[in-house]
Image: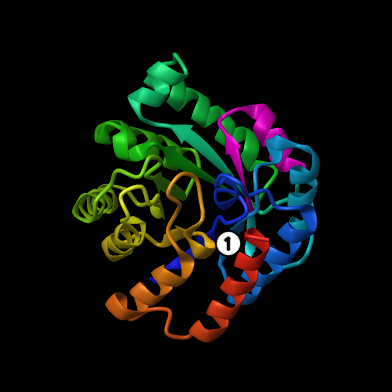
Amino acid sequence: MGVEIVDTTLRDGEQKAGIAFAPEEKIRIASMLDELGIYQIEAGIPAMGGHEKRSIARIAGMGLKSKISTWSRMNKNDINQALECGAEIIHISVPCSDIQIFSKLNKSREWVIDNMKSCIAYAAGGCSEVTIGMEDASRADFKFLMQVMAAALENGVKRVRYADTVGVLYRQRIYNEIVKIRNELDVEIEMHAHNDLGMAVANSIAAAKAGARYIDCTIGGIGERAGNCSYNQFIEAAREHMGIFQNIDLNRAMEIQADIMKIIYR
């Protein structure tokens, strides 16, 4: 089974300090990502409203070959905003570490699973696919992660994002954890790496080798704090170490990256 790219330049990439795309810039970037052959474009956060929501709806209506997804917190208001955009995929971020659950939200693990089930059911009727993201998975209890994934699968979810939200993972650990997940659950894994320790690309390669089918990237590796997994770097590393993505025109990919970077650092 091949590896697919989920580009989050328009969502996580825009969280880099100093970056705010104008609506027409979002449209141009989405068109260029589609030209690259990106499997899925995470177009933004509908709950932000205003220009953000309108831009996402425009991208969803452009008829691109790339699948269009939105990012939502685990609440029905966010999901309502996402449903109104008409995207194929609604992604729901589920807090999974005790730091997130107890300290930030003052909730319980049971609340997380119950609320996740409710939100999945609520979103499922209005889109083609619901995916969940295990927020702060790299600092979560692994047994609880397995419970979250099992509950998601029981409620119709097929794909789960493993989010290294604060960028603390290393290659061997993510490789081992994804192998364990795939040995126990029939779930598709999406890897979302941050570059705080300079290992986003290496961790994403390790995840792909362990069986993750989807890898999250941004153009130029832009993103919150130290950034995300760089699209071009990941493609080149995957070609070198896994023998995949041989059909991608790297020269054209570099040209498109340069064009997008001009927009980013205008």
Residue extending furthest toward the front: 266
Is 76 in front, or is 138?
Answer: 138
Residue denoted by label 1: 40
Mark 1 burial class by Cα count in 10 Å: few <14, some 14-19, many 20+: many
Q: Which residues are magenta?
A: 69-84
What residue is shown at x 66% (from left), y 32% (from top)?
Answer: 78
Answer whether residue 27 is visible to the viewer in this image: yes
Count of number-bearing discs: 1
Q: Is residue 75 magenta?
A: yes
What residue is shown at x 58% (from left), y 56% (from top)?
Answer: 9
Q: Is residue 65 above or below residue 70?
A: below
The quarter in which the N terminus is drawn is bottom left
Q: Is residue 102 above or below residue 42?
A: above
- In the image, taking residue 265 as reference, residue 234 lies left or right, namely left
Give x and y (percent) for residue 122: 63, 33
The quarter in which the C terminus is drawn is bottom right
Give x and y (percent) for residue 247: 48, 86
| Element at label 1 | strand
What residue is shown at x 62% (from left), y 41% (from top)?
Answer: 124
Give x and y (percent) for residue 208: 33, 63
Q: Quadrant of residue 108?
A: top left
Q: Quadrant of residue 253?
A: bottom right
Give x and y (percent) for residue 62: 78, 64
Q: Is residue 261 above or below residue 239?
A: above
Instruction: Kindly identify the amino acid type of the residue bearing the numbered disc 1.
Output: Gln
Tell me which colouring the rendered structure shows.
rainbow
